[in-house]
Image (cartoon, rainbow, N blue to C red):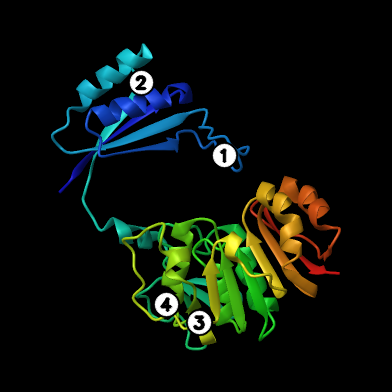
């Protein structure tokens, strides 16, 4: 069935009131978006800021009366806001994102492909990937830079930590490119589930337990065997990560957690091992280097579209 989508541009200070009003009016879902290309890359910890020009979007059944709803919003705001209505056709929302996600070349060997696509090249190393609700498809510059580094520099048989794994893309790519074992770490249960699902798509054996990856979302179950004895991929939250000494640590997160985690991440890399850090804006480069310089010597910075990737060797 089709849906009615009501979009209203508001001052962020009124967002909670308008959100509640839309919910009271029968909205099936309410979301907030940027109305003026004003991205928030990394808000301070403990805060949830909104854009200076905020757009609130309500999804309603077709029987809703948008003019009446907007009149109520206008009364709340003291003036009529900018608003519009459109019809949204029903579709398979779980797969709709695939319209913009196509096979992606990441270096000379590696391709990231959504499920169901033909192999783009007979000699390609394929990582089959559906990110689900977790970040990471390879299309963002930060992820692409990490994947290209793996394609060019990963040593066969390496052990790898993917810290902040999201969809599992970096750890799984490392395994597909010849790593012997990887540890995929994330504090988001959806990321752990996405990583487990993507590992299964790539016939990668998983080491985990139901209590680590599934308990936060009990209606989900694993439909493939867990083979702890010959596992290639460990999946779990940071507090359960063993004290490993890996050949390579990948962390594609954000500058502030990278700085805070520096003493912890250092302990996970063996002397002579490599570190790859991304999710960093160009003007954050020096603060990241300063946090890791006590332990790592860095190579020249790689930059793309204002984002950087730092690579270094543990002394």
* Lower position in the chain sequence, tag 3 or tag 4: 4
Residue ID for mark 1: 40
Mark 4–mark 1 contact, CB under 8 Å? Answer: no
Mark 3–mark 4 contact, CB under 8 Å? Answer: no
* Lower position in the chain sequence, tag 4 or tag 1: 1
Residue ID for mark 3: 228
* Lower position in the chain sequence, tag 2 or tag 4: 2
* Lower position in the chain sequence, tag 2 or tag 3: 2
Q: What is the secondary structure assignment of the residue under circle 1?
A: loop
Q: Quadrant of residue 80?
A: top left
- Which dot, 2 or 3, sits closer to the camera? 3
Residue 224, image x, y percentages: 37, 79
Residue 12, image x, y percentages: 47, 26
Q: Nearer the viewer, residue 85 or 168?
A: 168
Residue ID for mark 4: 200
Q: CA separation, marks 3 and 1? A: 41 Å
Q: CA separation, marks 2 and 4? A: 48 Å
- Which dot, 3 or 1, sits closer to the camera? 3
Callout 2 crowding tier (Cα within 10 Å): few <14, some 14–19, many ≥20: some
Q: What is the secondary structure assignment of the residue under circle 2?
A: loop
Query: On the rendered structure, is 202 left or right of 162?
Result: left
Residue ID for mark 2: 81
Callout 3 crowding tier (Cα within 10 Å): few <14, some 14–19, many ≥20: some
Classify 239 as above or below 287: below
Q: CA separation, marks 4 and 1? A: 34 Å
Q: Is residue 106 at least partly visible in the picture?
A: no
* Lower position in the chain sequence, tag 3 or tag 1: 1
Residue at figure coordinates x 36%, y 11% from the top left:
78
- Which dot, 2 or 1, sits closer to the camera? 1
């Amino acid at each position: 069935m089709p849906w009615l989508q009501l979009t209203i541009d508001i001052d962020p200070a009124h967002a909670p009131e308008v959100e509640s009003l839309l919910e009271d009016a029968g909205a099936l879902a309410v979301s907030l978006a940027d109305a003026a290309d004003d991205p928030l890359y990394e808000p301070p910890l403990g805060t949830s800021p909104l854009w200076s020009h905020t757009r609130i979007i309500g999804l309603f059944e077709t029987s809703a009366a948008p003019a009446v709803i907007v009149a109520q919003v206008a009364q709340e705001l003291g003036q009529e806001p900018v608003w519009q209505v459109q019809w949204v056709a029903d579709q398979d929302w779980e797969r709709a994102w695939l319209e913009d996600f196509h096979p992606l070349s990441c270096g000379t060997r590696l391709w990231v492909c959504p499920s169901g696509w033909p192999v783009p090249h007979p000699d390609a190393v394929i990582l089959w990937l559906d990110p689900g609700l977790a970040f990471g498809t390879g299309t963002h510059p930060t992820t692409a830079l990490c994947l290209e580094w793996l394609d060019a520099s990963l040593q066969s048989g390496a052990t790898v930590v993917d810290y902040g794994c999201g969809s599992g893309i970096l750890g799984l790519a490392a395994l597909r490119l010849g790593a012997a074992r990887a540890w995929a770490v994330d504090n988001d249960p959806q990321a752990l589930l996405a990583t487990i699902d993507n590992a299964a798509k790539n016939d990668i054996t998983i080491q985990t337990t139901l209590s680590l990856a599934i308990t936060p979302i009990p209606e989900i179950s694993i439909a493939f065997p867990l083979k702890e004895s010959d596992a290639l991929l460990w999946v779990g939250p940071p507090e359960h990560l063993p004290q490993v000494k890996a050949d390579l640590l990948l962390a594609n997160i954000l500058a502030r957690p990278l700085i805070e985690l520096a003493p912890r991440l250092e302990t996970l890399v063996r002397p002579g091992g490599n570190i790859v850090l991304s999710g960093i804006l160009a003007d954050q480069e020096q603060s990241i280097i300063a946090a890791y310089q006590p332990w790592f010597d860095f190579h020249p910075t790689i930059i793309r579209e204002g984002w950087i990737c730092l690579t270094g060797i543990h002394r």
